[in-house]
Image (cartoon, helix red, strand yellow):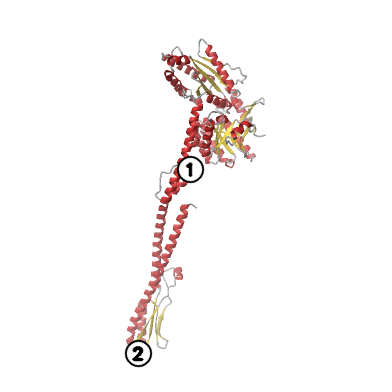
């Protein structure tokens, strides 16, 4: 029972007791008054009648007539004349019959009818004693009317008092309601400052203390966010252009190659501004500032779309990752940039003829490593620099990649879905206390029985608009597995393509409703990149997941400013971040401490991924990291092993 109801119940109980006591006192006083009134009336009647009978003491018939006349003209229970010898001379009476009053009231209220006496005498001769007893009917009616009036009055007064006390308590305890909401919000990692300060001193002190605590926690959170943003700027931003630097570029390229999505295939271009050192020598660094600003602005405005990632390696070389881009798309984007750069150089007489633009481009695939991809792009750039005519060179990849048309890909994927040839594998996330969950990966068993990783087929799955079909397949298979294996907990990746499809989202909602019994053993993951590109949709997703009691996490978290801002909005149950964001770099300890402060204040588990050996796990554990995923922790194994 809430404090409000307890106080309201107490006030109401006291009020009822007080009203009942007052009602009892008033009723008793009224009863006593009516009893006295009945006696007074009977006494007056006896005195008056005794005087009337005095002249006729010798005539009993006359006295009987006069008594009958008084009895018939009044409202009496009994009138009798008793002689000096104690015998009745004359008596008239009737059994009291109470009308107009409920029987229960008559039974409950014992209204004794008092009798009044007066002597009847003629001179010194006493004829007898006259006894008059009034009828209680009228008294009961009067008492009943008085009782009804008192009850109605007290009910009205009580109701008004309860209503008034209700609103007064609401007003007085509204501060406590706000304090409770504030405490619940803090428990849910939200920072709410109560603007309404109550006037009651005790409540005012509590509200002020809660506000101070909330503001302090919020300031700590904001300070750590700022620390991480500065760390990002120093570690992953080029100070000259503000673009991402080579380190971040390499990390993201490695992330794309290893991703189980359409980003696992794409294009990488390296752009070199030849003669930049000569231009700086001739006109100086300050005069080159507008040139770098223009290049950075163009790249951010034109090469950051569609998930492309521009970067600056040094003052001469720039690069861009174009995940999921086709050969035609990447070539067109690169030609547009080179054309624009040549126009920019030609428009400035101070650098025209000194600087030229060369670019090399190469494709990357899911089965390659980062070093190989960058080597291919560097080689293509070297070839471009040697060309007398032309600015762009593409690396001719002679890989044995399967070449299929769209129709063939479509048939292969649809057939694999129909024949259940998509194989689920899993890798455990572990901590010193045991296994947290197993993350699901999807693979394809081709017609030859060979197992192909997701990077092989996911680009075409997305391109052919079959991603929703595959996501549904994975979700259904995972649900079946959890139903059959009650000791397992699975983490299922949800693609941004699936989230963006209204029909799929509705289907997903129904799946969760039908499987609420699995909410403790089924969790979901969305990529940090999907959140940054579709923040509103991911907020709806988070609301749906939490509203139904399930949990979710953020995969491949990169600690970018935008990602950090989304953490407080989404409040995931955990985040997964590659270990190389956590240790090894300069000031990494400071950044890790800030990230841990943020995740702990928001109740978020921090999971280090790509942990490939025990030494790396020990190094992470020494930094107070408790959850790990990688081949050094657990191998990827078939789900239905």
Q: Is 164 situated above or below 148?
A: above
Depth check: give the residue in front, 95 or 562.
562
Please give left or right for residue 190 compared with residue 124 in the image.
right
Q: Quadrant of the C terminus?
A: top right
Q: Is 554 situated above or below 355?
A: below
Q: Secondary structure at mark 2?
A: strand
Whether residue 534 is visible: no
Residue at 38% across, 64% down: 149
Residue 185 disc label: 1
- Residue 144 spot, x, y in % from top left: 40, 68
Please give left or right for residue 48 compared with residue 256 in the image.
left
Residue at 43% across, 77% down: 95
Residue 528 disc label: none
Disc nearer the start of the sequence (1/2)? 2
Provide the residue designation for mark 2: 125
Depth check: give the residue in front, 628 or 129.
628
Residue at 36% across, 88% down: 126
Label 2 Cα crowd, 10 Å radius (few <14 / some 14-19 / many 20+): few
- The image quadrant of residue 490 is top right
Whether residue 237 is visible: yes
């Amino acid at each position: 029972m809430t404090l409000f109801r307890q106080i309201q119940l107490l006030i109401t109980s006291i009020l009822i007791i007080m009203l009942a006591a007052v009602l009892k006192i008033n009723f008793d006083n009224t009863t006593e008054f009516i009893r006295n009134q009945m006696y007074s009336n009977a006494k007056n009647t006896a005195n008056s009648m005794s005087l009337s009978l005095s002249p006729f003491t010798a005539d009993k018939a006359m006295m009987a007539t006069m008594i009958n006349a008084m009895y018939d003209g009044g409202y009496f229970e009994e009138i009798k004349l008793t002689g000096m010898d104690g015998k009745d001379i004359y008596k008239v009476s009737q059994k009291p019959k109470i009308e107009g009053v409920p029987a229960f009231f008559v039974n409950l209220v014992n209204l004794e009818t008092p009798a009044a006496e007066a002597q009847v005498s003629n001179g010194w001769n006493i004829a007898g004693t006259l006894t008059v007893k009034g009828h209680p009917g009228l008294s009961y009616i009067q008492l009943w009317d008085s009782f009804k009036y008192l009850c109605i009055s007290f009910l009205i007064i009580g109701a008004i008092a309860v209503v008034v006390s209700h609103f007064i308590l609401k007003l007085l305890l509204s501060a406590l309601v706000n304090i409770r909401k504030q405490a619940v919000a803090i428990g849910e990692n939200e920072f709410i400052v109560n603007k309404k300060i109550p006037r009651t001193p005790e409540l005012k002190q509590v509200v002020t203390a809660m506000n101070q605590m909330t503001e302090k926690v919020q300031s700590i959170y904001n300070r750590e966010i700022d620390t991480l943003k500065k760390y990002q700027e120093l570690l992953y931003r080029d100070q000259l252009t503000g673009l991402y630097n080579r380190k971040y570029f390499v990390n993201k390229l490695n992330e794309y190659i290893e991703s189980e999505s359409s980003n696992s295939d794409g294009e990488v271009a390296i752009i070199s501004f030849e003669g930049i050192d000569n231009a700086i020598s001739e006109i100086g660094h300050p005069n080159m500032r507008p040139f770098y600003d223009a290049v950075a602005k163009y790249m951010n405005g034109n090469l950051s779309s569609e998930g492309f990632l521009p970067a600056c390696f040094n003052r001469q070389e720039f690069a861009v990752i174009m995940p999921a881009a086709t050969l035609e798309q990447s070539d067109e984007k690169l030609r547009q940039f080179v054309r624009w750069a040549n126009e920019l150089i030609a428009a400035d007489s101070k650098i025209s003829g000194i600087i030229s633009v060369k670019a090399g481009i190469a494709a990357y695939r899911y089965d390659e490593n980062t070093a190989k991809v960058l080597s291919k792009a560097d080689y293509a750039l070297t070839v471009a620099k040697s060309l007398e005519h032309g600015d762009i060179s593409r690396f001719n990849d002679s890989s044995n990649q399967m070449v299929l048309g769209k129709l063939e890909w479509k048939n292969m994927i649809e057939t694999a879905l129909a024949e259940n040839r998509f194989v689920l594998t899993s890798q455990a996330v572990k901590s010193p206390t045991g296994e947290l969950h197993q993350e699901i990966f999807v693979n394809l068993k081709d017609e030859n029985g060979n197992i192909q990783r997701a990077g092989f087929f996911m680009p075409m799955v997305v391109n052919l608009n079959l991603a929703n079909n595959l996501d549904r397949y994975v979700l259904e298979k995972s649900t079946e597995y959890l139903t059959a294996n009650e000791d397992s907990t699975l983490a299922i990746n949800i693609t941004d393509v699936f989230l963006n499809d209204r029909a799929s989202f509705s289907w997903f909602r129904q799946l969760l409703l039908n499987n609420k019994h699995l909410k403790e053993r089924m969790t979901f993951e969305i990529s940090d990149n999907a959140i940054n590109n579709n923040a509103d949709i991911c907020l709806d997703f988070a609301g749906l997941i939490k509203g139904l009691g399930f949990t979710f996490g953020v995969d491949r978290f990169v600690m970018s400013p935008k990602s950090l801002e989304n953490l407080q909005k989404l409040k995931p149950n955990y985040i997964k971040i590659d270990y190389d964001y956590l240790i090894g770099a300069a000031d990494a300890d400071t950044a890790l401490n800030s990230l841990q402060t943020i995740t702990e204040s928001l109740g978020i588990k921090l999971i280090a991924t790509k942990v490939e050996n025990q030494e790396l796990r020990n190094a992470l554990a020494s930094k107070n990291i408790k959850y790990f995923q990688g081949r050094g922790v657990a191998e990827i194994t078939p789900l239905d092993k």
